[in-house]
Image (cartoon, rainbow, N blue to C red):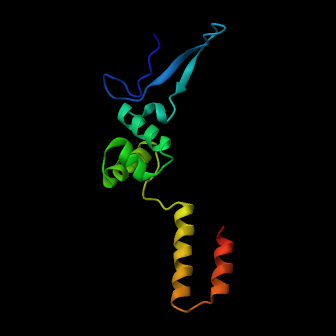
Amino acid sequence: MIYDAPGKCPICNGELHITRLNCKECDIEISGTFKLCKFCQLDEEMKFFIASFIKCRGNIKEVEKELGISYPTVRNRLDKAIEALGYNPHEESSYDEISNERQDILKKLSDGEISAEEATELLKKLK
């Protein structure tokens, strides 16, 4: 039987490293110190959440249905997953920046500061 490698030390909760790899086909063995991938270091609950999130193609409403949890709970778990992978969940992505720029352009259009043609040109440049 083959087991999943634990992501953390079961004794002290410290970081684990792989020291030997073995090929089932040719039986070669490689020794050294290898880090576990970021995903391997996550606990089982977090791995299950991320798998569900991917299965639902990132659609939070679908994740809600799949896991039977509320929207705020999905967002909270997503933020925890982002943090667990070493990223800042509150850092603005380039998508967020473009979205904010689009909102600014649309606001200027609705306030009459720019024409529809100008707004169209500005929106085209964001793509």
Instruction: Return the x and y of residue 1 as percentages of the image width and height.
Output: 45, 10
Residue 108: quarter of image:
bottom right
Instruction: Return the x and y of residue 84 as percentages of the image width and height.
Output: 41, 42
Residue at x-position 54% and y-position 22%: 33
Answer left or right for 112 relative to 8. right
Query: Which residue is more in the foreground, 76 or 20?
Result: 76
Name, please, the residue furthest toward the bottom. Answer: 112
Answer left or right for 24 relative to 61. right
Residue at x-position 36% and y-position 24%: 9
Residue 15: quarter of image:
top left
75 over 38 or under it: above or below: below
Residue at x-position 48% and y-position 35%: 39
Instruction: Return the x and y of residue 127 as percentages of the image width and height.
Output: 66, 67
8 over 19 or under it: above or below: below
38 over 64 or under it: above or below: above
Residue 49: quarter of image:
top left
Number of numbered labels in the structure image = 0
10 over 44 or under it: above or below: above
Answer left or right for 112 relative to 71. right
Name, please, the residue furthest toward the top. Answer: 27
Residue at x-position 54% and y-position 80%: 106
Query: Which residue is more in the foreground, 99 or 66?
Result: 66
Instruction: Return the x and y of residue 122 as percentages of the image width and height.
Output: 65, 78
Query: Which residue is more in the foreground, 21 or 66?
Result: 66
Query: Which residue is more in the foreground, 123 or 28?
Result: 123
